[in-house]
Image (spheres, coloured by chain):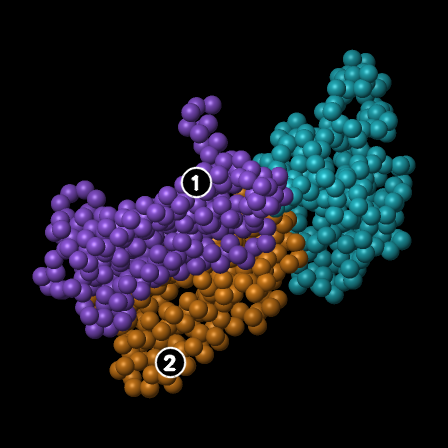
Amino acid sequence: MKPGTLGAACLAVIRRDLTLSWRRRGDALNPVLFALVVVTLFPFALGPEPNQLARIAAGIVFVAILIAGVLALDSMFRSDCDDGALEQLVLSPHPLPLLLACKILVHWTTTALPLIVAAPLLAEMLHLQHAVLPVLLAALALATPLLSLLGAVCVALTVGMRRSGMLLALLVLPLYVPVLIFAAGACDAAQAGLPYLAPLLWLGAALVLALVLAPLACAAALRISIT
Amino acid sequence: MRPACASRFLHRDAADARKAWRDRAGLASIPGSMATSPDHDPIPLLEARGLAFARNDEPVFGPLDFRLFAGEVVLIEGDNGAGKTTLLKVLSGLLEPGAGEIVLNGEPLTLARLSHQVALLGHLTGLKGDLTALENLRFATGLGGMRPGITPSLALGSVGLEGYEDVPVRQLSAGQRKRVALARLLLVPAALWLLDEPYANLDRGGIDLVNRLLDDHARRGGAALVTSHGAYAFTSGTPRRLPLRSAA
Amino acid sequence: MNKLTLWFHKFGSPPVFHRIGGLLAPWLFAAALVLMAVGLYGGLVLAPADYQQSDAYRIIFIHVPCAWMSLFIYFFMAANAFIALVWRIKISEILAMTSAPIGAAFTAITLATGALWGKPMWGTWWTWDARLTAELVLLFLYLGVIGLYHAIEDRRQAARAAGFLALVGVVNVPIVHFSVKWWNTLHQGSTVRLLGPSAIDSSMLWPLLVMALATKLWFFASLFVRARNDLVELEAGKDWARKVALGEGDGA
């Protein structure tokens, strides 16, 4: 591909971010470990009784993955901001939303995908009904990209701030609540034997909307905060 | 008989520079060419009209008018805090000016219309520490394009880092990282170089390298705006100076 | 320049806003207090006891107007944020950022009175019904805007960033309401509609509307007082601000 074209630029961003993640592939396990810790704590707090855990298993898995995702959000732009690569990205005449979408894609692949792979293990530890597992995975597959996209907008607003963890959590919470409601709601419906397709479709619609709008918002937010 | 230009910073050097450009381009000898008379100047590569920037309502630099022509290297002088780095960021399109406009090659340069023609080398090199020098340069060309006739390996050789292609950048010294950043400048086809403290962290050989690169760039028809604390001599004679006083 | 733009330009000039705000604020406070007294008298004393909830319902005369204000102020903040981002008008930045704490306060009052209402109604101090939960998320939205505004040093950049967040949030408000409603429907449905017949007796309705107006006036009065302060602080270098700070007059 001819260097300097839009396609080459997107490919360059994806390749660079994937290479960087691979060079520090140990870090990719951190969110998974964190989710594992959270899930492990619940039986200690609530008691190991399988039926009780099974009732709330889907919810706990979602919350654990959500919090792990929030902690991993910071790494999206942090190192690029620190070494000036973000400036070069903003300076590039290629459409910034597209380049950011590539970055968000790679970030999702390296932080959320391991979590989705680990989800069956987490669900099993909490005695989730096996029939609900496919629904859980489908909801995760739709919800986690949504969380990454919405989170990217908030991270863009706080990029470069030291100790922005608490503020970031505060910013993403109102955006994450609807996603969590629909994702966990789908699992609850499946668990109760009720139709669960509607919430999943809502998630899908939201995801499609966010795929288009979130990179635009992220680029605008980045331009505001990079000055 | 000065051209109608509001700039108070143009010195005699500018007229000389334009003449030198025309000489180099061979235009003076072509009859009927468009840029032979001193009154009819070629389109400046970069023009700033009434450019001003304020942070927190404090003016950083005041209304600025200047022109930069192809083949010129201009040194921006000013004390610490005079706004040199900010000026470069505004000229690159990274920051939006509070007032005034920037015209690049006849086209306005705004946040919405950035250009491949501009390359900024700031305090931060923009290099990823975990990637090798070659990988960083490949990314730069993927994003910004590659000049014909040069490859990342050749560029590394030109800046004296032959053999360092596969070394992760975080293992390089500050001066070596600066050289990799300079190699990036060699690769991308940008006509306008905005260099913020390019001599920082470099040894004697590095300083010569920067001067040489600027010279070659000017000879190829590019232009450069350089900030520097010390006064360094460019190999092609005294550069035009653009003093920047802190706006009162 | 047409008349509206001219008026906006004039009102948008900081010294003028400072002066007009200073003149209006005491009157707005006074009017708000009077209306509050009337509304509360009508609601707490005059209106008859509710058929189902007896006297416990009377807290709606504070709860509901505060809930309406919390939403109104959020949209007011978002509108000003939009103007500030698109046209870079300083007054809009100030108005947007100043209304955030006031909105947060109204939201907190809504939540507190909701809890007080919940105790005799449902026996618990907190209940996760749709409306209260949406109010809680709204509180987080406000706190996020306030937090972001105070986390950035450059005041104008901070206002732009927090304003952008407010705009993102304003898209989120209906989404949150819809999703939380889907999640739980325990709270009684809206009994006062803007157009069309209300489901609530007129003797209870008029104190409610009076209180709604009173809280609106209170908001604007409070907004003017706070905005004037913030404006003087932001324009600290200018002459008119110096004059005001030294007490040499309004400077307008």
Label 2 marks a residue whose chain is A
As drawn, the chain in purple is C
Q: Residues within 10 Å of mark 1 (few under 14, many from 20)?
A: few
Q: Residues within 10 Å of mark 2 (few under 14, many from 20)?
A: some
- Above/below status of C236 relative to A14: above
Q: Amino acid at mark 2?
A: Phe
Label total for image: 2
Q: CA distance from mark 2 to mark 1?
A: 58 Å
Name chain A's colour. orange
Q: Position of residue C108 (x, y in %)?
A: 35, 61
Q: Secondary structure at mark 1?
A: helix
Q: Residue at x 49, y 62 (%)?
A: A167
- Above/below status of A187 relative to C239: below
Q: Identify residue for label 2.
A: A42
Q: Are marks 2 and 1 in contact (CB under 8 Å)?
A: no
Q: Is residue C152 visible?
A: yes
Name chain B's colour. cyan
- Above/below status of A210 relative to A166: above
| Residue B185 falls left or right of residue C80 | right
Label 1 marks a residue whose chain is C
Q: Identify residue for label 1.
A: C23
